[in-house]
Image (spheres, grey):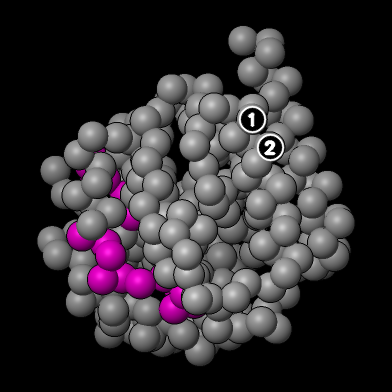
Amino acid sequence: MSDLILMPCYNEAKTLPGAVAEVLRWRGEADVLVVDDGSQDQSLQLLAGFPVALLRHCNNEGYGQTLIDGFAYAATHRYQACVTLDCDEQHEPHLIPRFLAELSDCDVVSGSRYLEASEGIPPLDRYQINQEITELLRSLTGLSLTDSFCGFKAYRVAALDRLQLDEPGYAFPVQFWMQAARAGLRVKEIPVSLIYKNFCRRFPGSLNTPEIRRRYYLRVIEEEAKKWQKS
């Protein structure tokens, strides 16, 4: 059984070619899938000529939905493992082999930008919300997380079948961790570099307001906790 590299994409024309080229350099025998979430820039045209598979949303459906659809693709095509990383050049593809190797004794390998000291500096509001939500998830789930929102991960595809993921937006990682703990998935964090290249990048709509984004994450945690209590 082979492995899949899954790259969510939305309006990443500036960084997409470089990111895909580096992934292809370090993918080994893995296939590469780009899930385009209704990009309106030149992202699709720039993919021409790259040996990657493509799924496309006609409209913007959300970061979480790109992952959900990518996981479904991985299951349908019988991949053994799936590595996710973003197209914004803030993840380091040379770590792909390590992520896959670390899956030998767990179900999820998650990158952490805070597991070790780093020279990178994140936007303050993102760091503060990440730390608050990560601490809450630790207390609720018992998982030893230090970075709940890093998108650089590796998963056993068979393990994902035990989850019922349906959060289409940026709170997807929150839902994922709640369900992963409930399902008893074996989780490991490994350190990754803290890289921010675009401090002007915005969340869509009202989510760019930190307090609204925080309340959104907390609402999803509450909803998942209620499901847990009913089971």
Vertical comparison of 179 with 196: above or below: above
Give the vertical position of 153 relative to 182 (above or below).
Answer: below
Q: Residue at x 44, y 78 (%)?
A: 89
Is 142 covered by the magenta stretch? no
Residue 7 relative to residue 150: left or right? left
Q: Split into 4 quadrants, where in the image is the C terminus?
A: top right
Image vertical order of residue 160 relative to residue 121, above or below = above
Q: Tag 2's secondary structure?
A: helix
Q: For this view, does 87 lie left or right of residue 190? A: right
Q: Residue sitting at 25 percent across and 42 percent down?
A: 103
Task: Report the residue marked by disc 1.
Answer: 139
Q: Whole-percent x and y of residue 35? A: 45, 63
Residue 46's disc is none
Q: Residues within 10 Å of mark 1 (few under 14, many from 20)?
A: few
- Residue 91 in the image: state x and y as whole percent: 42, 70
Start and end of the magenta stretch? 78-97
What residue is drawn where x is 79% and y is 51%? 214
Contact between marks 2 and 1 (CB within 8 A): the answer is yes
Q: Which residue is mark 2?
A: 136
What's the amino acid at mark 1? Ser
Residue 144 image point, x, y percent:
49, 37
The amino acid type found where label 2 is placed reads Leu
Residue 80 on the magenta segment: yes
Q: Which element type, helix, strand or loop, lies under badge 1?
A: helix
Looking at the picture, tell me which residue is in the foreground, 51 or 106. Answer: 106
Is residue 151 in view from this perspective? no
Instruction: Name the residue at 68% across, 45% down.
Output: 133
Quarter holding residue 49: bottom left
